[in-house]
Amino acid sequence: MRRLYNFFGTGESLVKYHHFPYSAAMTGAFSFRALWRLLGGGFVLHRAAICVTLITLCIADIATSSQQQTRHEPHTAGSRQGCLSCHPISPDTHHQFGCTQCHGGNPDAVDGALAHVDLIARPAHPDHAEAVCGGCHTRETAMVKENSHYTLTGHITLVRRAFDPAADEIELSELRAHNTPHDSMELVDDALRRRCLRCHVYNNGEAYPLARHGTGCAACHLGYDGERFSHRFSAPVDMSRCLSCHYANHV
């Protein structure tokens, strides 16, 4: 306000001439009616109008800048940027699509809870692989469903028949976990389900680097660096992926 006063260059007499309180001029505590009288008095009208216009533009610019600083730009559909602000992974350079292509969720949300609605944490898991991975790799996901890494038929039967030669040949989907086993076969099934088969594609494996792996397709095609799962796909499969299950015990 003092700059505006000095710009007019009229001193205190200008304010008094227009019946405009000097203290109000110095503090900015004036009414629009008083300002109108100042502008309408015929005294350097063009200079007053310029000043008022500049002040108005400055106020509008400050308000706009404040809004821009507090407003988050929405994530573009399928973009990675929003996800990477919380999930520090290195995206694969061979697959140019957003995180939501596999993981679902809402790429336009700016709130974490809303961004994770309908999220698929493990999209390569056998429960999701056909719908997620199969969107691009239809033939491969259809073939792997019959693979022994998925069905585990031979592995399960071999162990079960060591305890009961007449045990039925079953697949993993038929293997039951028993909280209170009633006989030796239920105990075997429970041990297989909870411990022995932790290596395989339905589970992330033991919680240490050399045995940790992804689930489903990711068990072979994605690595693990000891802290988080890699998002860089490997085809053909790197030998280190095989060793996460088939390690020194020669399984």
Image (cartoon, rainbow, N blue to C red):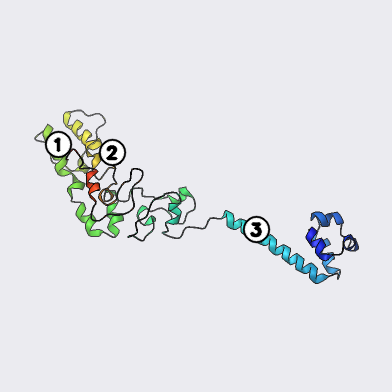
Residue pointed to by mark 2: 206
At label 1, counting other C-alpha atoms closer than 10 Å, the crowd grade (few under 14, some 14-19, many 20 or more) is: some
Q: Marks 1 and 3, Cα distance to the nearest angstrom?
A: 72 Å
Q: Which mark, by number, is residue 28?
A: none
Q: Marks 3 and 2, Cα distance to the nearest angstrom?
A: 55 Å
The quarter of the picture where residue 11 lies is: bottom right
Q: Position of residue 90 (x, y in %)?
A: 38, 53
Q: Which mark, by number, is residue 159?
A: 1
Q: Quadrant of the C terminus?
A: top left
Q: Are marks 1 and 3 in contact (CB under 8 Å)?
A: no
Q: Marks 2 and 1, Cα distance to the nearest angstrom?
A: 20 Å
Query: Nearer the observer, disc 2 or disc 1?
Result: 2
Query: Nearer the observer, disc 3 or disc 2?
Result: 2
- For label 2, the SS is loop
- For label 3, the SS is helix
Total marks in image = 3
- Which comes sooner in the sequence, label 1 or label 3? 3
At label 3, counting other C-alpha atoms closer than 10 Å, the crowd grade (few under 14, some 14-19, many 20 or more) is: few
Residue pointed to by mark 3: 63
The kind of residue tagged 3 is Ala
The kind of residue tagged 1 is Val
Q: Position of residue 33 (x, y in %)?
A: 82, 62
Residue shown at the point (14%, 36%) measured from the top left:
159
Q: Position of residue 112 (x, y in %)?
A: 47, 48
Q: Is residue 242 left or right of residue 87?
A: left
- Which comes sooner in the sequence, label 2 or label 1? 1
- For label 1, the SS is helix
- Which comes sooner in the sequence, label 3 or label 2? 3
Towards the viewer: 193 or 249: 249
